[in-house]
Image (cartoon, rainbow, N blue to C red):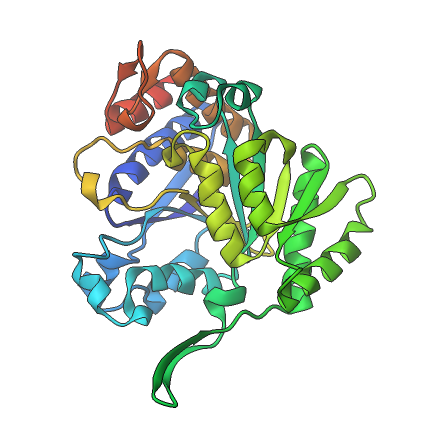
Amino acid sequence: MEYKIGLIKGDGIGPEIVEEAVKVLDAAAGKYGFAFNYTDICMGGCSIDRFGVPLTDEAIKAAKESDAVLMGSIGGNAATSPWYKLEPSKRPEAGLLGIRKALNLFANLRPSVLYEELRSACPLSTATAKKGFDLIIVRELTGGLYFGERYTKDIDGTETAVDTLSYNETEIRRAAVRAFDIAMKRNKKLTLVDKANVLDSSRLWRKVTSQVAKDYPEVSYDTMLVDNCAMQLVKDPAQFDVLLTENMFGDILSDEAAMITGSIGMLPSASLNDSRFGLYEPSGGSAPDIAGKNIANPIATILSAAMMLRYSLDQDKAAEGIEQAVRQVLKDGHRTGDIMSDGCHRVNTDEMGDLIAGAL
């Protein structure tokens, strides 16, 4: 069996961390009896430099022809990069929004797991860290504020900016179904996060999600306002299993959930459509300040590759093998700088990839 994988190496540390994920994927393929055919896809700042736009029709076509896409990171330093002197529709992040829409990637999965070996790196209280947590955020990805009508214009002599938050029941229902399906495979608990005390869109989220919940009587379902959820993630993240939310709230909460593990460089991400196709990427950004220094943490990208094996390629044993290899390397005391602690052995980006591939 050979799988066709699109590789969006992207900007900043993207090429470095993708290279290590490919290294681990090839090791897994050799062990579990399948193969990969990789196709490079240019998107983001590198695409602006080459083609003048962050996402080309050719890039979309190549992604659609792949069984799945593995991505590094997109974007640069907003204060210094010439990419951010362009209008918003031509900046690197517009390519990311564009490919999500073009591939109908409506559900983003962001696990947040505090590894036992990294509990000392958790910024929360000792008691909370000792308790540990394992949750996943399901974020609707192609609707809401980021895709609504927007404009900036002069109104009665005052410059005014407008962004429109809009959802329909179909967009909400398909995200809710995906979240409840995931909850059934985990601890059968789901929390809808919204702002239903203020927003009409959130009230529609509650109405539709409560309807979907009736089809999953085994799942314990509740709701929580987004500001309270932000506080509860810091106070007691172990209370959560599956968090379902809209696009902007999910964007913010998933980064918070990532950082309470100790490093955003540890957490993977998957964006899925109605089929088995998905785009897989680390939760962190392009980190241009450390690009090319061989010090970035590749584990989030490697774990994203494991998610790709599980959700898009049906290679569950290989996915479990990679995840176990990551745990073993951490247990053996190897750390990149962002998760370094006393008594551990500091390694570079490529050394971490070698260790995980070797642990397979």
Q: Is residue 45 left or right of residue 104?
A: left
Q: Looking at the image, which residue is at 57% across and 20% down?
A: 131
Q: Position of residue 341 (x, y in %)?
A: 32, 17
Question: Residue 275: percent from the left, percent from the top?
Answer: 59, 54
Left or right of residue 303: residue 86: left
**Relative to 103, residue 214 above or below:** above
* 232, above or below 171, in the image: above
State whether residue 2 appears in this view. no
For the C terminus, which image quadrant? top left
Q: x and y percent of residue 149 in the render?
A: 47, 76
Residue at left offset 70%, top offset 32%:
187
Taking the image as shown, residue 24 lies to the left or right of residue 243, namely: left
As drawn, the residue found furthest toward the bottom would be 156
Q: Count numbered badges in the picture.
A: 0
Residue at x 30%, y 37% (from the top left corner):
17
Q: Quadrant of residue 237?
A: top right
Residue shown at 44%/52% (left/top)? 66
Residue positioned most to the top = 343
Task: Judge from the rendering whether residue 296 lies leftward or rightward of residue 317; answer left or right.
Answer: left
Q: Is residue 297 visible?
A: yes
Q: Is residue 325 above or below residue 77?
A: above
Nearer to the camera, 244 or 48 = 244
Camera-side residue of 304 and 81: 81
Locate residue 219, reporting x and y percent.
77, 40
Nearer-the-camera pick, 37 or 276: 276
User: Is 41 situated above or below 203?
Assistant: above
Toward the viewer: 222 or 348? Answer: 222
